Image (spheres, helix red, strand yellow):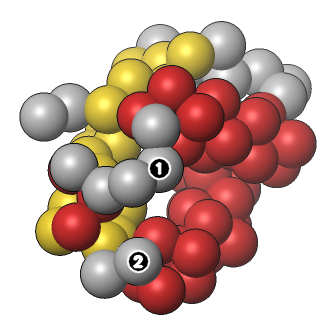
Amino acid sequence: MMNSQELRLNVEKALEEIRPFLQSDGGNISLLSIEDDKLVKVQLEGACTNCSVNQMTLKSGVEMTIKKYAPQIEQVINVE
């Protein structure tokens, strides 16, 4: 199991992978917090708050990518 610091680094790596797709749509994503080493809170910014991409698709894509890097993450929440 990764410790909190490794976990954070891996979640950031996942976001680095996602970010270019969001930026091409005029948006961005930032990591707000990781709670209990299993819940990630992110904030979608810019155009992505109401972009053409369905929120659920976006969320599942973000969640899937994060879980690829950090399998112990159980949930990803977008904080409005």
Say if mark 1 contacts mark 2, CB within 8 Å. yes
Q: Is residue 24 above or below residue 3?
A: below
Relative to residue 70, is residue 59 drawn left or right? left
Q: Can the viewer see residue 30?
A: no
Relative to residue 73, is residue 33 drawn left or right? left
Residue at x 57%, y 83% (from the top left corner): 20
Closer to us: 17 or 1: 17
Residue 7: quadrant of the picture? top right
Helix, strand or loop status at disc 2: loop
* Label annotation for residue 25: 2
Badge 1 crowding class, 10 Å Cα cut-off, few under 14, some 14 to 19, many 20 or more, is few
Q: Is residue 23 above or below residue 67?
A: below
Residue 18: quadrant of the picture? bottom right
Q: Can you say which quadrant of the picture contains the N terminus?
A: top right
Residue at x 47%, y 50% (from the top left corner): 53
Q: CA distance from mark 1 to mark 2?
A: 9 Å
Residue 63 horizontal/vertical position (percent):
64, 33
Say whether disc 1 or disc 2 marks the residue closer to the N-terminus.
Answer: 2
* Residue pointed to by mark 1: 53
Badge 2 crowding class, 10 Å Cα cut-off, few under 14, some 14 to 19, many 20 or more, is some
Residue type at tag 2: Asp
Residue 13 horizontal/vertical position (percent):
67, 67
Helix, strand or loop status at disc 1: loop
Closer to us: 63 or 57: 57
